[in-house]
């Protein structure tokens, strides 16, 4: 044994420690190149689920703005907002459902139903705010019904809510006698809901931001994602998957009812029993898919859905100004949904590669 070995030998009772060996991560002669700034920026952008739809919205705004000067006028932007805000509010609820692997096809009918419940309550002497709260509670009860049938009886949510479409629409027609009713035009609540030109937009953006925070920064959001990505694994981990789905159904129905009341007060100043409907529901779902939410569950973005809905509104409005047939818009909408699904799938692969870098 050498002198060096003797010095290195630990004393009796001492714990032998391993010397840390410094590693060289970069530098001349190592063959390792430091991470480039642009590459880091590109990797970060690839992780943004909303990137593709935001870019398309910007391109469309520039294109229609250059081709039609009236497109960027305040009045026309207001038209786009009014055309899209209701679907954007519905999409905020639909994203939570889609992420956990479910869907609600009845929200378009709940949209038309809520205002008539509110007006019935107001007609019986209930203050307008109380009438609105009761209407939203009834809407949430329909959402709870959808959720209970789906999670307890094992019926696919597509089938459950398909039946609820006709149920809610029939009740709405009975309450309204199939006739529109004038919306309230005075009072603090009316002013808060729709008394300003951009009220609808503020509500849509506010709800989208709130739900994006919930989805990305809370346990509820994390559990929702887990419930859609791997429901069996989530259940084994202690997550109450059924409760998560029930919450999402209730939330989607509540947002639909609120949107119906706001739209009637803010835009038409009347409530139509045939308002909203399946067209509005499909627009909300299409916006969510275009915005980056997976139909099979496990991933989604509320902000992306907001941009996705406004993308459809911009397309529809821009085509109208250019004199293009509404039939063409439906063709473009179908192609956009298919391309969005393909693009989202490819971007997901890129993001996985980016995370591995």
Image (cartoon, rainbow, N blue to C red):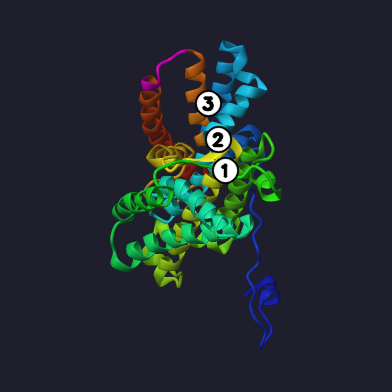
Q: Residue at x 33, y 53 (%)?
A: 167
Q: Nearer the viewer, residue 43 or 219?
A: 219
* Image side of residue 342 versus residue 303, left or right: left
Position of residue 333 relative to residue 257, above or below, is: above
Specify whether residue 20 is in view. Answer: yes
Mark 3 vs 1, N-terminal side: 1
Element marked by disc 3 = helix
Compute the Cα span from label 3 to label 2: 20 Å
Q: Residue at x 62, y 55 (%)?
A: 128
* Magenta stretch bounds: 323-327
Q: Residue at x 68, y 74 (%)?
A: 8
What residue sits right under mark 3 in the picture? 314
Specify whether residue 32 is in view. Answer: no
Question: CB atoms at circles 1 and 2 under 8 Å apart?
Answer: yes
Residue at far bottom of view: 13
What residue sits right under mark 2 in the picture? 268
């Amino acid at each position: 044994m050498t002198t060096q070995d003797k010095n290195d030998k630990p004393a009796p009772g001492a714990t032998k420690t391993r010397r840390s060996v410094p590693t060289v991560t970069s530098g001349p002669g190592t063959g390792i190149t430091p991470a480039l700034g642009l590459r880091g920026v590109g990797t970060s952008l690839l992780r943004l689920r909303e990137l593709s739809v935001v870019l398309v919205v910007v391109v469309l705004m520039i294109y229609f703005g250059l081709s039609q000067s009236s497109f960027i006028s305040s009045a026309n932007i207001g038209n786009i907002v009014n055309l899209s805000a209701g679907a954007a509010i519905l999409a905020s609820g639909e994203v939570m459902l889609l992420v956990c692997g479910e869907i609600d096809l009845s929200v378009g009918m709940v949209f038309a139903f809520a205002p008539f419940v509110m007006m019935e309550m107001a007609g019986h002497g209930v203050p307008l705010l109380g009438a609105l709260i009761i209407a939203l509670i009834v809407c949430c009860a329909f959402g709870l019904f959808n959720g209970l049938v789906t999670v307890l009886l094992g019926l696919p949510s597509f089938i459950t809510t398909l039946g609820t479409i006709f149920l809610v629409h029939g009740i709405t027609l009975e309450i309204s006698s199939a006739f529109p009713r004038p919306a309230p035009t005075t009072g603090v609540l009316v002013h808060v809901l729709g008394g300003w030109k951009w009220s609808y937009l503020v509500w849509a953006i506010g709800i989208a931001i709130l739900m994006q925070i919930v989805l990305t920064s809370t346990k509820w959001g994390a559990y929702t994602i887990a419930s859609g990505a791997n429901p069996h694994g989530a259940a084994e981990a202690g997550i109450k998957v059924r409760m998560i789905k029930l919450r999402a159904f209730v939330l989607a129905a509540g947002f639909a009812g609120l949107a119906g009341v706001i739209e009637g007060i803010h835009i038409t100043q009347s409530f139509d029993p045939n308002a909203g409907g399946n067209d509005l529901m499909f627009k909300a779902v299409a916006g969510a898919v275009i915005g980056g939410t997976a139909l099979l569950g496990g991933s989604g973005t509320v902000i992306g859905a907001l941009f996705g809905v406004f993308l459809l509104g911009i397309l529809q409005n821009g085509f109208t100004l250019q004199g293009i047939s509404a039939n063409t818009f439906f063709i473009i909408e179908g192609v956009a949904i298919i391309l969005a699904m393909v693009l989202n799938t490819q971007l997901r692969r890129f993001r996985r590669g980016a995370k591995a870098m």
